[in-house]
Image: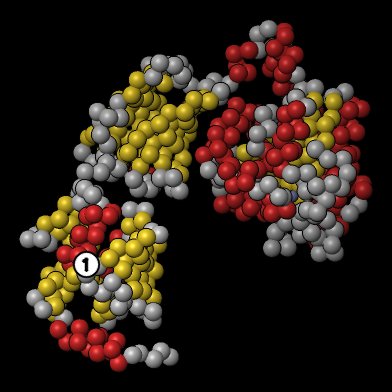
Amino acid sequence: MKFWTIKTILAILLLESVLISAPSLNVKKSAHDQGFNISVYEVYGYPWISASQFLLMLGSDPVSDIEKYTAAGQLNGHLISLKAGSAFIHFDITTYHLPVPVERYGSELVIPLGEWIRFLHTQIYPDMEYSPERRHLILEPTSYSIRDIVLQNFKNGSTLRIETNRIFREQDINIWEGRNGWLYCTIYGATGDTIQLNRVYDSGILRGIIPIQSGETFQFSLRLRSAIAGFDFYIDPENRSININLRKPAALATTINTDETSQKWLIDTIVLDPGHGGRDPGALGADGTREKDIVLDIALRLGRMLERDLGVKVVYTRKTDVFVPLHQRSKIANNANGKLFISIHCNSHDNRRASGSETFLLAPRLTEEAIRIAEAENQVIRFEENQEIYKEMTGSQYIVAAAAQSTFLKESEDLAAMVEKHYTKKLGTSSRGVKQGGYYVLMGASMPNVLTETGFISNRTDLQKFKRASYRQQVADALFLAIKEFKNKHEKQILGN
Ligand SMILES: [Zn+2]
C-alpha cells in the first residue's frame, strides 16, 4: 500500500481531466519497417507522448513499473529511464533535463512531444526524420542493415564477419558455391552500401567481394583466390553479425606424398583423457559411485593395451585422481604431439531409464541434445578459477576453433563410428549414435578427437556393470579395437598401400 501525497493525487487528477487523445505518432526504426503507433494526448492544446509506450515498443529490454511510476529501456544502445514527477531523464550514467516533469497518465508516463523529439534527436538519433504534419518519425532513415564486412585470415582458412544492425534469421541467408571460384551469399531483407562494401584483397583465400542490392535482397559475390575445402556460416546474435567460415583444403590432402610427411601423420602417440578428477567428481551414480573413478580405471586399462599391443606412446591428461583444467587437457595433447585424442566419460540423465553409449565430435552446429550434454560436461568449468578463458571461447573463437577442427572432423567422425560399432559388438549395449557436441575439452586439440560416453551412470543396470572390473576391461577392449581399426585404416591411406 502506498500513501500518495495530496500533491500527487491532485496532479494526476488534474492531468487526467485535461488529457484528450490526439492522433498517434507512427515511429519506425528504419524506413523499411512497419513501425508502431505511439499514443499522443493533448493537454492545454499541447501534444504529450507516452514515453513509456515508446520505450516498451521501440526499446530493448523495456521495464515498466506502474507501482513506482517508472519506465526504462534501451534506445540505440543507450539506457533511458523515466520517473513520474521528475524532470530528469536518466540517460546512461548522466541526466537530461526537461523543462517540465514527466507526468503519469493511467499506466503511462507522458512527456511533451516536442521535448521528447528534441531529446531523441540531440542525444540518440542524430539522423532521425520527423514530420509533425504527417505524424511520423523514422529513427534511422539512412541506416543500412549491413554495416560492414570484415575479413580475418587464419592458418586454416578465413572468416568473413558481416556486421549487421539487427539479428538475421538463418532462413534469411543463403550461401552456395558457384563455378570457377565464386561463392555467393544472399541475405533477404537486408540493405547495404554497395560502393562502400566493395572489397579487393591482395592475399588470402579471398580476392574480393562484389556487393549487389536487388530489391529487398542484398547479395554479395565472393571471388576466391584458391579452392576451398568447404564453408559454413553462423549467426552471432550477441555481436549482431553473420560469420562465414571458409576452410582451406586439409593439409593432409596436399602433403601425403613424401615419406617424411607421411611419418608425421602416423598414429604414434595417443592421448587419453579420463574425464573430470580431483574436486570435480563428474556424474554420480545413485550409490555415490563417481564418474571420475570409473573413467580413470577404463583409461588406464586402455592405455596399457595400446602401449603393449599397438606399440604406441600413450599420454594421459591425468593418471591419478587430480583436477586438470579443461584448457590444460588440450594443451597436454598438443604438447605431446598427439595424433589422436580420446576423452572418456560416463553419461547421466534425469530419466534413469536412459542407457547406451554415444560418441561426440566437435562441430559448429549443435543439436539440442548435444547442448544438454555439453552443458552437463562443461559444468566442470565452475570448478576452475580461470573462467575467463572459456567465456571468451563462447563467441567467435569457439567457431574459429571449430573451423580449425574441421580438418580433423572427417577423421574424428570415422573414429567415433568405430567406437560405437565396437561398443555394440563387445558390450551388447545400444548405440545412441555419433553426435556433434560442443565440449570445451575438445577445443584446441589439433588432432582427430572424440569424446565418448561409455554408458549411463544414472542407469541402475549400467551402474552395476560399471562397478565390475571385468566390465570396465570390456569397455577398454572395445575402445582398443576401435583405435586399432582406425589406426590401420588411417595409416593405409597415408602410406598409400
Ligand atoms: Zn563426464
Give the number of marks.
1
Q: Secondary structure at mark 1?
A: strand
Which residue is label 1 attached to? 38
Q: Is residue 241 visible?
A: yes
For the N terminus, which image quadrant? bottom left
Residue 319 lies left or right of residue 259; in this view the side is right
Residue 301 lies left or right of residue 387; in this view the side is right
Q: Residue at x 60, y 26 (%)?
A: 407
Q: Residue at x 73, y 38 (%)?
A: 328
In the image, residue 462 sits, relative to residue 436, either above or below, namely below
Q: Residue at x 33, y 53 (%)?
A: 76
Q: Amino acid at mark 1?
A: Ile
Residue 250 placement: quadrant: top right
Question: Residue 15: horizontal and vertical position, in percent?
Answer: 20, 83
Residue 302 lies left or right of residue 336; in this view the side is right
Residue 451 placement: quadrant: top right
Residue 55 placement: quadrant: bottom left
